[in-house]
Amino acid sequence: MSTKQFGKYAFTAKGNTILGLSNTNNVKIHKNSRICFVMDTAIANPPLTGMTYRLVNITNTLKKKGYEVSWIICNRNFKSAESFELFKSIPAKIHIVSKRLFYNKNYLLSIITENKIEVVIFEVTQTAIFFSHFLKEKVPEIPLILECHDIEASLMEYRKSSEERSLQMFLQYHAGMILDGIVCMTQNDHKTL
């Protein structure tokens, strides 16, 4: 990954360990920074998917390193208040947003500004693209990052048409060009992206 190509920020990750957050434009990300993960997915604790497992581990690692962590989750699977009890052990402020409100740009902006979020990390390419231009206009000082890996485009080689693969690769490229950074999950992703 070229920091020039993808912007100011890059996480370097090895397995489930974050090795560092770097920037190339002298923007300081200090301990106690407020980092928010924005995700549109069904989520469970204990984790049932690789994404949730990794997110819980990254959250724990960031908290140990002195960062404040928030999650903004589109409610895809919670049916009752008791469902939320599963997350009390996770060291993050968790906002579970109804499907009706999640893609309301002003509503997301209100959560970000009211909680004084300093870095936003998206978990889905399409979600990042949907919000990025609006957030860059409203809060240009907040870095927007996509946690992206090449597995989506790679898996499509086996399951989908070349048009769908091309679209996914274009979306990942477009996100890389408009966002401030890309999180690389593996060394292979680092080379591919």
Image (cartoon, rainbow, N blue to C red):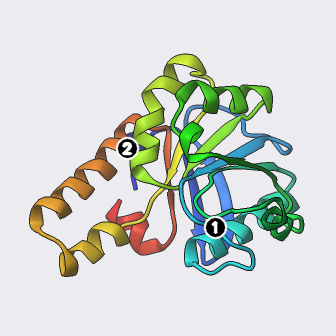
Residue placed at 82% from the left, 59% from the top? Answer: 81
- The residue at which mark 1 appears reads as 43
Residue placed at 26% from the left, 57% from the top? Answer: 168
In the rendered image of this protein, does residue 187 appear above or below residue 98?
Answer: below
The amino acid at mark 2 is: Ala
Say which element carries label 2. helix
Residue placed at 58% from the left, 37% from the top? Answer: 101
Residue placed at 48% from the left, 34% from the top? Answer: 131
Q: Quadrant of residue 78?
A: bottom right
Rounded to the nearest angstrom, the CA distance separating label 1 from label 2 is 24 Å
For marks 1 and 2, give the one nearer the viewer.
1
In the displayed orientation, state which residue is furthest to the front. Answer: 80
Q: Quadrant of the N terminus?
A: bottom left
The amino acid at mark 1 is: Ile
Circles 1 and 2: CB atoms closer than 8 Å:
no
Q: Foreground residue, 191 or 69?
A: 69
Say which element carries label 1. loop
- The residue at which mark 2 appears reads as 175
Residue 126 in view in this figure: yes
Q: Quadrant of residue 53?
A: bottom right
